């Protein structure tokens, strides 16, 4: 039974995006996909989203800028954003959190199961 | 003619003359007296006869008597004269004898004495204690001989002295002769040495000129005494006159963006502490154009006859090499980074398959998938390690020292490794010095160190092995010790154990996992913190690692990178900082 939560995956690598999509669909989430910052922005405005899984290194508009933009929009700022990036440096993490991300995960250090669990608990 | 001879001759002559004249006199007289007497008597008698013939009554008897008396008187006078002559002769003889005895004899005696003195048999004459001329003579002779003797002594003395002086001058002469020979030999040797020295100097000059490394000699005030061609070339000062200039001002050394102050210069330190100093690997000089030249450098104190006279700086332009290194590091970094995305993808898909998200799997599939999972984790660990190495080498790792309790770090690491410790039934003991205080270290970097060492100990231990961790402190440092009873490191592999990608043969054969980068990273962290790391190991008995950290702590370093946490190939939860 699909739940009513919609998650946007912003990720330019197709295989990663697909893995995430698969995993989330197992948990019965509604999954949307954007492969660049601009596309993501359009989708955010169009769709009703509960959570965004945000990669940082993406074309056209990087993740931080995207995050900053939506947080400025009163209609969008409450969407939960989990940053998922391979940039694992302290300052990037802090930057992300300061911009309003609820969490910052380093893709290569995470099990996909953990990501799913985290999302579950956030949207429970 | 000798006096005595004269006397003798005179005596003899007188005697002879006396005899002769006496004889002549006597003879003549006798003749005269007798013949004369006879003649006279005859004549008288003739006359008498004549007279008688003539019957002159004159008697010549009185004349005859007178002649007779005359004859008697003559005889008597002659006897007296003879007697007187003899007497005179005897007296003369006696006188002569006496004269001889009183004069000639003592004189002869004196003569003998003097002869004896002059022949050296006696030193002094016997003084004739007479108050006459002979006595005076004797005294005078004695005085003379005394004086003679003393002057002889003086002369002997002088002679001795002269002899000594002569001896000395002889010796001097020999000595000088030897000196002359020695000097000639020395000159020959010196000449030879000079030729050799000139040859060597030419050789050295050639060597220095053909060397690629810069060589600079400075005096105690850091003024340039000499710089070879290569050095000048590196600094772009081939034509410049830099002798006598201050090297510090010429080099404009910097480490990174920071200028090096004079007391921090390896040249200054080397001279001050009289030891060899390696320049920092990030040291750079400015050339004449103001361009930064990265250098590898070493300074040695110049000590001649135990006195320090200056220093010798040898340096090499490594800009190219550094650039290549940097590019290599950058490449590794970029490549590793690029690898992470596909790795993540594989990992997640694999994970979902294993979790059954994509359908039920049969055991044989599960088996393969699990093997894949192991491989993926290994690859991930390797990629992380490569990135760590690249970051360490780039010098961009951030160091955030905060007061850290090392025992807490150890405890946390042990918690993280609980699973494999339990699985292998490893007995863990810890000894933490009670007095141990917190030291300023970056907790993540220290965590990395302990994680790597403990992870190795567990990984390379057999079941039921032992692991002991001790923390103690001495005057300046905190010492950590990690001991295990595992596979150990073979002696012939021990010197490579900290090298990049090195794994000892014995562990490769045991088929355990490892990137060969862990110890390299640990050593880099420890040494950049001012500490030391060392170990002892016996194959199949165990290994003990020690490392020291200065109590003064790590130096804060700004960096734009952090180390990736250690991931192992065992599938347990990695350590993430939350």
Image (tube, rainbow, N blue to C red):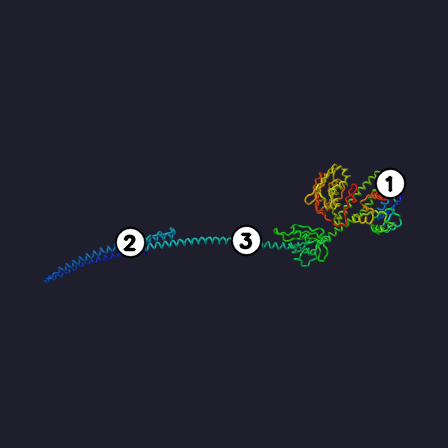
Q: Which residue is mark 1?
A: B359
In the displayed structure image, the side of residue B394 where residue B9 appears, left or right:
left
In the displayed structure image, the side of residue B408 where residue A63 appears, left or right:
right
Q: Chain of mark 2?
A: B
Of callouts 1 and 2, the N-terminal one: 2
- Vertical placement of residue B64 versus B427, above or below: below
Image location of residue A3, percent across then percent down? 89, 43
Q: Which is in the foreground here, disc 2 or disc 3?
A: 2
Image location of residue B450, percent across then percent down? 74, 43
Judge the density around disc 1: few (<14), some (14-19), many (≥20) Cα neighbours within 10 Å.
few
* Residue B561 makes an appearance in the image: yes
Q: Nearer the viewer, residue B463 or B21?
A: B463
In the displayed structure image, the side of residue A97 where residue B76 appears, left or right:
left
- For the residues marked 1 and 2, what is the alpha-carbon distance in whole angstroms? 181 Å
- For the residues marked 3 and 1, what is the alpha-carbon distance in whole angstroms? 106 Å
Residue B98 is labelled as 2
Instruction: Quadrant for residue B466, please give it.
Output: top right
Q: Nearer the viewer, residue B489 or B524?
A: B524
Q: Secondary structure at mark 1?
A: loop
Q: Chain of mark 1?
A: B
Residue B182 is labelled as 3
Image location of residue B148, percent across then percent down? 39, 54
Of callouts 3 and 1, the N-terminal one: 3
């Amino acid at each position: 039974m699909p739940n009513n939560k919609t998650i946007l995956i912003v990720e330019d690598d197709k295989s990663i995006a697909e893995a995430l999509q698969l995993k989330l669909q197992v948990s019965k989430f509604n999954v949307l996909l954007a492969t660049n910052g601009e596309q993501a922005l359009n989708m955010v405005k169009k769709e009703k989203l509960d959570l965004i899984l945000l990669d940082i290194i993406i074309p056209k508009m990087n993740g931080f800028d995207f995050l900053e933009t939506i947080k400025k929009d009163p209609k969008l700022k409450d969407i939960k954003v989990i940053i998922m990036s391979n940039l694992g440096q302290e300052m990037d993490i802090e930057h992300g959190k300061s911009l309003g991300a609820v969490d910052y995960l380093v893709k290569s250090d995470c099990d996909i199961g953990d990501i799913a669990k985290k999302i579950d608990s956030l949207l429970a | 003619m000798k006096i005595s001879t004269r006397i003798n001759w005179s005596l003899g002559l007188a005697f002879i003359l006396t005899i002769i004249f006496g004889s002549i006199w006597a003879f003549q007289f006798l003749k005269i007296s007798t013949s004369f007497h006879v003649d006279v008597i005859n004549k008288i008698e003739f006359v008498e006869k004549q007279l008688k013939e003539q019957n002159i009554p004159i008697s010549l008897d009185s004349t005859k008597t007178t002649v007779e008396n005359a004859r008697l008187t003559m005889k008597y006078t002659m006897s007296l004269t003879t007697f007187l002559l003899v007497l005179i002769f005897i007296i003369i003889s006696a006188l002569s004898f006496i004269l001889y005895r009183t004069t000639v004899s003592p004189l002869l005696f004196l003569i003998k004495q003097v002869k004896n003195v002059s022949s050296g048999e006696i030193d002094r004459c016997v003084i004739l204690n007479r108050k006459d001329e002979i006595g005076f003579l004797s005294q005078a002779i004695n005085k003379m001989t005394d004086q003679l003797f003393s002057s002889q002594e003086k002369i002997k003395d002088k002679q001795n002295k002269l002899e000594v002086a002569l001896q000395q001058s002889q010796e001097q002469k020999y000595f000088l002769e030897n000196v002359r020979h020695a000097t000639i030999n020395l000159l020959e040797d010196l000449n030879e040495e000079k030729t050799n020295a000139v040859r060597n100097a030419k050789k050295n000059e050639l060597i220095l000129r053909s060397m690629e490394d810069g060589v600079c000699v400075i005096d105690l005030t850091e003024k340039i005494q000499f710089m070879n061609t290569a050095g000048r070339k590196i600094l772009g000062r081939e034509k410049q006159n830099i002798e006598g200039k201050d090297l510090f001002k010429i080099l404009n050394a910097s480490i990174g963006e920071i200028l090096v102050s004079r007391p921090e210069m390896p040249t200054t330190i080397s001279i001050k502490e009289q030891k060899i100093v390696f320049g920092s690997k990030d040291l750079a000089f400015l050339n004449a154009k103001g361009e930064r030249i990265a250098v590898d450098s070493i300074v040695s104190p110049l000590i001649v006859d135990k006195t320090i006279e200056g220093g010798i700086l040898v340096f090499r332009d490594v800009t190219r090499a550094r650039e290549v290194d940097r590019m290599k590091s950058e490449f590794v970094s970029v490549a590793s980074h690029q690898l992470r995305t596909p790795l993540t993808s594989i990992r997640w898909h694999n994970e979902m398959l294993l979790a059954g998200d994509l359908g039920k799997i049969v055991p044989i599939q599960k088996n393969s998938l699990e093997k894949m999972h192991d491989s993926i984790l290994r690859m991930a660990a390797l990629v992380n390690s490569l990135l760590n190495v690249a970051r360490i080498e780039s010098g961009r790792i951030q160091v955030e020292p905060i007061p850290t309790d090392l025992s807490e770090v150890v405890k946390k690491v042990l918690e993280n490794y609980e699973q494999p410790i339990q699985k292998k039934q490893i007995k863990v003991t810890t000894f933490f010095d009670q007095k141990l205080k917190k030291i300023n270290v970056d907790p993540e970097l220290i965590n990395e160190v302990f994680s790597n060492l403990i992870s190795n100990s567990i990984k390379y231990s057999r079941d039921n092995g032992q692991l002991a961790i001790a923390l103690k402190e001495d005057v300046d440092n905190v010492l950590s010790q990690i001991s295990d009873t595992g596979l150990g490191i073979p002696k012939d592999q021990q010197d490579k154990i900290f090298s990049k990608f090195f794994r000892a043969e014995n562990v490769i054969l045991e088929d355990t996992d490892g990137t060969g980068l862990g110890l390299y990273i640990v050593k880099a962290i420890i040494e950049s913190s001012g500490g030391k790391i060392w170990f002892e190991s016996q194959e199949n008995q165990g290994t003990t690692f020690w490392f020291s950290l200065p109590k003064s702590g790590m130096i804060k370093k700004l960096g734009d990178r952090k180390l990736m946490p250690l991931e192992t190939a065992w599938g347990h939860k990695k350590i993430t900082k939350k």
